Image (cartoon, coloured by chain):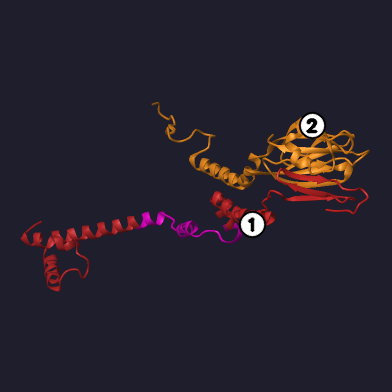
Chain colours: A red, B orange
């Protein structure tokens, strides 16, 4: 810095176009016309800016962002259709098995319930005699039933 | 620690060893057993009474001769006294445990058999099927625990016939 004006205008050298008020910009130009040191500093600033910008652009260009979107979408989107369903089943095996088994168990329960029908509870004194070619006789006593075979030549009875 | 040695994290004491059932698997196994128990439960009550001790006596009744009653048949007098035979004697006795739905054969004096099947057994009642295949007769009878079945098992011949008495829980 060669003078007090340089101290004032030094921070303005790195300002972007349009960043300074018009009055300060005019004052800066007037100072630069008369100050070689500040012109040299401004030239250095601009050269440095160019180098940094170029280096950053080169660094960014070295990274290939082309598959980035595809990679993100591959993680976001899930396969659909049969393949998607199979993948879902493979991920949740227990839940899938339980889901498939539940209706089968329910159907089995219904079949068992229907096939059993209403339960007939035997009562004391229930007697059923089946005899071919005979007329069986049943006597009921308090001590229990007495079953007689009947005459073999008699009428068939049950 | 030597450089390059891979360090495997220690298994925590709470986690199960490899190959054993983990907590989630164990819960599923318990659930499966519970389901099986629920399915089989209705038949368990019947299985509890699946065997019943039975006393079967073979009795000969005759129309001829002076009236008499074998002293061993006194408990059957109320039933035998209803019949037209006047002489009663016990000619055989068998004590067996009859399993549920499994026929048991008892030999008869004429060479045929009496087939006894336990059809049902409850708190106070029992149901038997009494079969006399030689006479093509099959009876299904339900009695209380203090009753007896008297069943004719042979045809009358020369004024005599054979009977069988069935007594559960003698």
Instruction: Point out the frontmost of discs 2 and 1.
Output: 2
The image shows residue B86, relative to residue A136, as above or below, that is: above
Residue at image x 91%, y 39%? B159
What is the x, y in percent for residue A119?
Answer: 66, 53
The span picked out in magenta is A57-84
**For the view shown, which residue lies furthest in the bottom direction?**
A22
Mark 1 Cα shell of 10 Å, populated few (<14), some (14-19), many (≥20): few
| Residue B9 visible in the current orientation | no
Q: Chain of mark 1?
A: A
Mark drawn on residue A90 = none
**For the view shown, which residue lies furthest in the top direction?**
B2
What is the x, y in percent for residue A27?
Answer: 11, 69
The residue that mark 1 highlights is A110
Q: Give A72 or B67, whichever is nearer the viewer.
A: B67
Residue A76 located left or right of residue A112: left
What is the x, y in percent for residue B84?
Answer: 84, 43
The image shows residue B98, relative to residue A154, as above or below, that is: above
Residue at image x 60%, y 57%? A83
Q: Give B99 or A90, whichever is nearer the viewer.
A: B99
Residue A102 is drawn in which quadrant?
bottom right
Residue A41 located left or right of residue A84: left
Q: Name the quadrant of the C terminus of chain B.
A: top right
Q: Give B142 or A25, whichever is nearer the viewer.
A: B142
The image shows residue A89, relative to residue A35, as above or below, that is: above
| Residue B113 visible in the current orientation | yes
Residue B72 is drawn in which quadrant?
top right
The residue that mark 2 highlights is B70
Is the magenta region chiefly helix, strand or loop?
helix
Residue at image x 57%, y 58%? A84
What is the x, y in percent for residue B57?
Answer: 78, 34
């Amino acid at each position: 810095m060669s003078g007090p004006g340089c101290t004032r205008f030094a921070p303005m050298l790195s300002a972007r176009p349009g960043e300074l008020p018009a009055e300060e910009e005019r004052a800066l130009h007037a100072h630069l016309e008369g100050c070689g040191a500040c012109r040299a500093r401004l030239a250095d600033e601009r050269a440095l800016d160019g180098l940094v910008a170029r280096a950053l652009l080169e660094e960014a260009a070295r990274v290939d962002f082309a598959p980035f979107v595809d990679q993100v979408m591959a993680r976001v989107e899930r396969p659909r259709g049969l393949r998607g369903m199979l993948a879902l089943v493979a991920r949740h095996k227990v839940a899938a098995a339980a889901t498939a088994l539940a209706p089968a168990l329910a159907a089995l329960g219904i079949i068992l319930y229907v096939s059993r029908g209403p339960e007939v509870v035997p009562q004391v004194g229930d007697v059923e005699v089946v005899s071919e070619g005979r007329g069986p006789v049943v006597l009921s006593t308090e001590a229990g039933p007495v079953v007689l075979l009947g005459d073999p030549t008699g009428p068939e009875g049950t | 620690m030597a450089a390059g040695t891979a360090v495997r994290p220690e298994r925590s004491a709470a986690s199960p060893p490899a190959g054993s059932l983990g907590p989630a698997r164990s819960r599923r196994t318990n659930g499966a057993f519970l389901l099986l128990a629920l399915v089989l439960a209705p038949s368990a009550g019947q299985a509890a009474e699946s065997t019943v001790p039975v006393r079967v006596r073979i009795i000969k009744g005759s129309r001829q001769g002076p009236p008499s009653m074998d002293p061993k048949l006194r408990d059957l007098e109320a039933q035998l006294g209803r019949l037209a035979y006047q002489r009663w004697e016990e000619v055989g006795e068998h004590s067996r445990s009859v399993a549920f739905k499994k026929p048991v054969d008892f030999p008869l004096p004429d060479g045929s058999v009496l087939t006894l099947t336990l059809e049902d057994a409850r708190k106070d009642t029992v149901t038997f099927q009494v079969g006399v295949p030689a006479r093509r007769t099959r009876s299904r009878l339900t009695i209380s625990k203090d009753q007896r079945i008297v069943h004719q098992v042979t045809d009358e011949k020369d004024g005599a016939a054979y009977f069988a008495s069935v007594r559960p829980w003698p």
